[in-house]
Amino acid sequence: MGFFDKIKKIGIFNGFSELTEDFYEELEEGVLGIGKENVHHVAPSKTGDPVRGYLVSIPAIDHGKLSILEAQNNFAKEIDWANPGAVAAGTKVLVYTSPVNQGEAEPPVYYELVPDSLMWTADDFDTKELIPANASEVAFTMPEENITISAQYRAMTNGVVLDKGELVFEVEQIRSGSRWNPQIGWKVTDPQRLTAAIIPDSAANKNVVWNVKDTDGSSTDIISVDEKGEVSVNQSAKWIQELIKAGVANQELYPSKKITTEAKDYGTVTVTTEAGQKRASAFVTVNFKITDDTVVPVVDVKLDRAELAFEITRVLEGDRRSPKESYTVTPSRRLYETISPEYADNKEVVWSVGDSDVLRVDQEGMVSARENAKWIGDLIEAEKEKNKENPYAKQEAAGSRSSYVTVTTKDGEKQAVCAVNLSFKTVDRTVVHVEKVSVNQAELKFSVEKVLTGSRTSPKVEYKVTGAQRIGAVVAPAEAQNKSVKYSVADSTVAVVSEDGVVTVKRDGKWIQDLEAKDAANLAKNRYALSTAAGSRATESSPQKDASQGASHTRSSRETVVTVTAEDGQKTAQCKVKVEFKTTDQTTRPGTSSGGSSGGSSGGSSSGGGSGSSYRGSSTAAGGPGAVGQTQGSWKQDSTGWWYQYQDGSYPKACWKQLSYNGVLEWYHFDDRGYMETGWFTDTDKHVYYLNPVSDGTKGRMVTGWNLIEGKWYYFNTVSDGTRGAMFVNRKTPDGYQVDGKGVWVQ
């Protein structure tokens, strides 16, 4: 009975009811623990019986894993470097290998099994066997001896990179000297070295192969590369030679043109690893050009014009005795040269003039005349001497000169000439200005007479006014070209002057109105007093006859000045205008047949300082025309509006009143309740009035003259004729403008 049968029979391991894989593992571990070479190893059979086994040792492997397992044996265990074990002889053993990659390294490193490195070796080193690693199943048959299984891993070649991704080569052919027999030179970029780096650096096989191709993958002779990666450009390449041939052929057809050939070609340099056939490429650009420095000499030069003409005009403006002088000259003219042959290389030229006092030319061929030339100055001085005794004579200096312009080529000093003719003239636009203005009259006199007739309580008023008079103006000297003058009056309340010097006195001037207003205030105190219309602060007035005698003559005068101003030079002259205002009161007192009674004012024409009452011809106020009523009071305002209260507590209503506000006397109208009215108002006589509605310190006052109301112009009577303040309708205004049926100015 064998050793292993005895073990099974005696069942020395009481703890096991049956043999298991763990049993053999513990048994083998015990055997290995003895550590003696003559000790037999134990391995499980496929049925689980212990059988004689042989030790399998697996050392640790760099960058890989190695283990074995008996095939088709459920009791077998996997054996590796950390777990040695025994295998029965003659059994099939499966071998497992795998690399330990460094995938997180930068760059990652991957490993592979070194070919023919997987084998087992007997402990006595006499026997060893290669285990095929590329078979579909990696296995071997266990020999009857202890063995060691070994393998080697190496870093794989994962890629290759070049230190440059692009190379550029410049190839230049330089042609110099005669265009027909040029000298040839070359400028070519030196060879450039490419360096290949294998990835990873620890790769076992770093052998590479270099080659060049065209960009389409075909072969090329433009560039070449040696086994060390040094790249060179080939100036004799077919592509370059064909470009040179084409450029020369084109120049033979067009000899005036230089060869300007420029072209590019491309290729690639590829490096391939021996291990793994990894590739990297560099793009190569070859720039080729021909620099043609050949020259063609000048044979002749011509100009585009044989003759040029310039006109210099002297312009005089302003005052003829001290004119402003300016010059206008024909614009500069450009001369263009033509070099023969047209394709000559050195076309530089030099420009010059025959007389630099007459002409100038720049180096672009731009020719211009000199307006300040001496010959022109001589002509002007000669004319000034001629007209010395006649300062108002027009200047007409004129003359002509001639010269030439020459162009000379720098190559060969060939020349061409252009004749230049110059003419000079003077254009005199000066004027003779006004130096003095005078008038034909030193003084004009006017008279305004106010004549009152009829009943003193309701007199008839008539005005007698001196007619318009004309002022004549004379300008000097007689040669003055602009003899226009303008007329203006210093005090427009006294008189007005037309554009042609006609002076008209203003019958309703404010100074006259002020006199009449003062007279009306006096009459308000004594309705039977004579009208005097006196009291102007500029003049004195004196009655011609005592009021008790039944008639009165009062005079007052006012002066102003009419100024005549020359439009040219603003020279002036003045004419004094004197206006005399006279009131002749021929009224009779009621109940008498002759003068001697006091008279009233005319239809609301009076005005003056202080508060009081007055008559207005269109009024239907209580008390009737000429009613005096209260004379002192004050303005009041309540929630309804403004009203006027007399000292006795009464107030005007349904009437016109001339009252003072802030020291200014104006006409106001009060309604039936006694409140001051504003805006449009139609009186009982159908006349329309406008009472200022704006709170500007004159609210309620009756307006006169032109007024812009709600975007339209209206005219209200300014004359104290019983309808002062009434709106004009369907008629012309005193200043000649037409208003329609609604009083609106017809534009």
Image (spheres, grey):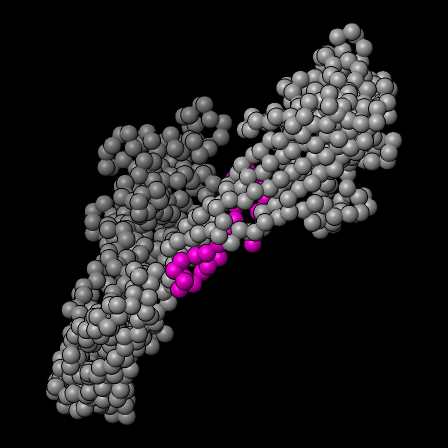
> Looking at the picture, does residue 66 appear above or below residue 645?
below
Residue 170, compared with residue 42, is above or below; it is below
Q: Position of residue 475 (x, y in %)?
A: 43, 57
Task: Tell me where residue 17 appears, x and y as whole percent.
Answer: 49, 27
Between 713 and 517, the residue placed more toward the observer is: 517
Q: Position of residue 415 (x, y in %)?
A: 16, 87
x 73%, y 23%: residue: 549
Residue at (36% x, 40% y) in the render: 79
Q: Is residue 589 left or right of residue 350?
A: right
Q: Magenta segment range?
A: 473-500
**Is any atom of residue 243 visible in this view?**
no
- Residue 205: quadrant of the picture: bottom left
Location of residue 268 by image quarter? bottom left
Compared across the picture, whether 533 is left or right of 472 comes to: right
Asked if residue 463 lies in the magenta stretch, the reply is no
The count of marks equals 0
Is residue 487 a member of the stretch shown in magenta? yes
Q: From the top left corner, tell me how far across and down residue 518 is, in percent.
A: 66, 23
Quarter of the view holding residue 583: top right
Q: Is 413 displayed left or right of 107 in the figure? A: left
Q: Classify 659 as above or below 507.
A: above
Image quadrant in which the N terminus is located: top left
Horizontal side, residue 677 vs residue 44: left or right:
right
Q: In the orientation shown, which residue stands out farthest toward the top?
A: 648
Residue sitting at 23 percent across and 37 percent down?
37
Residue 226, above or below 134: below
